[in-house]
Image (spheres, grey):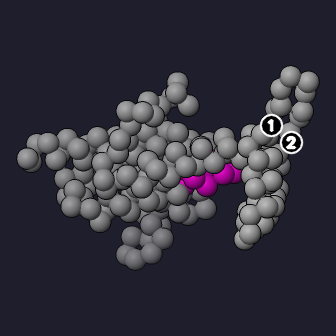
């Protein structure tokens, strides 16, 4: 994680602070629940503390969902688990929430026409609609028409959205949970800059 994110010095704007916290919580949960020693300690405490047995049942559900396999060696223990579905889900949730938080914020009028926000809008739409890009209007007078021009390209962070992505998978094929977090950070920095310029 430290090679990708400067965790200590990352501090999102209040509008998007919940997004930052959710991202850390996701990775911290995976790290904690896949650690053999921590799992055993949790189970022991849950078995002895009144009202905590349900947490062991939750841990069982986590194990089933991630297909975790723990290999105990002589000098170390290794956990192997499949978190890709959870990463995809978390990425989709972040994309949807960032878009919605920005749309209802006081900053919307200043960012709504930026290429980055248009990029986010298409990621959000695909995330909310079965995790696939769809650039055609579904309803109204424009039903069936394209939302983007034939040669239009919308770029952010080296990623390019165009008509060629129609019906293609958004997460994790086009963008990852870490990349959408960096997109959220881009908007957080933008909101902070707007605050600085208006004060």
**Residue found 37% across the figure and 52% down from its top:** 17
Disc on the earlier residue, 1 or 2: 2
Closer-to-camera residue (77/83): 77
- SS class, disc 1: strand
What is the x, y in percent for residue 166? 54, 52
Closer-to-camera residue (77/196): 77
**Residue found 45% across the figure and 34% down from its top:** 7
What is the x, y in percent for residue 147? 40, 58
In the displayed structure, 144 sits above or below 107; it is below
Q: Which residues are magenta?
A: 84-92
**Residue found 14% across the figure and 42% down from its top:** 196
Q: Is residue 108 magenta?
A: no
Q: In which quarter of the view is residue 72 placed?
A: top right
- SS class, disc 2: strand
What is the x, y in percent for residue 87? 63, 47
**Residue found 35% across the figure and 41% down from its top:** 11
Which secondary structure dominates the residues rendered in magenta? helix
Q: Which residue is mark 2?
A: 69
What is the x, y in percent for residue 33? 71, 47
> As drawn, which residue projects farthest toward the left?
199
Q: Which residue is mark 1?
A: 79
Q: Is any atom of residue 79 visible in this view?
A: yes
Disc number placed over residue 143 in the picture, else none: none
Residues at circles 1 and 2 in contact by the CB criterion of under 8 Å: yes
Tell me the CA gap for discs 1 and 2. Answer: 6 Å
Q: In which quarter of the view is residue 15 placed?
A: bottom left
Q: Quadrant of the N terminus?
A: top right
Residue 2 in the figure: left or right of residue 66? left
Graded by Cα atoms within 10 Å as few (under 14), some (14 to 19) or many (20 or more), the crowding at tag 2 reads: few
């Amino acid at each position: 994680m430290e090679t990708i994110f400067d965790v200590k010095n990352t501090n999102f704007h209040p509008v998007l602070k919940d997004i930052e916290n959710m991202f850390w919580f996701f990775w911290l949960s995976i790290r904690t629940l896949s650690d053999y020693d921590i799992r055993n300690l949790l189970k022991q405490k849950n078995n002895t503390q009144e009202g905590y047995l349900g947490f062991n049942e939750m841990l069982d559900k986590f194990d089933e969902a991630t297909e975790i396999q723990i290999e105990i060696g002589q000098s170390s223990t290794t956990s192997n688990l499949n978190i890709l579905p959870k990463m995809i889900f978390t990425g989709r949730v972040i994309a949807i929430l960032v878009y919605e938080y920005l749309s209802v914020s006081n900053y919307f009028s200043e960012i709504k026409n930026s290429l980055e926000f248009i990029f986010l809008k298409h990621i959000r739409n695909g995330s909310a609609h079965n995790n696939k890009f769809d650039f055609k209007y579904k309803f109204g007078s424009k039903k069936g028409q394209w939302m983007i021009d034939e040669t239009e390209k919308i770029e952010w962070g080296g990623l390019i959205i165009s008509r060629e992505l129609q019906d293609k998978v958004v997460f994790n094929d086009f963008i990852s949970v870490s990349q959408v977090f960096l997109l959220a950070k881009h908007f957080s920095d933008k909101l902070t800059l707007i605050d600085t310029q208006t004060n």
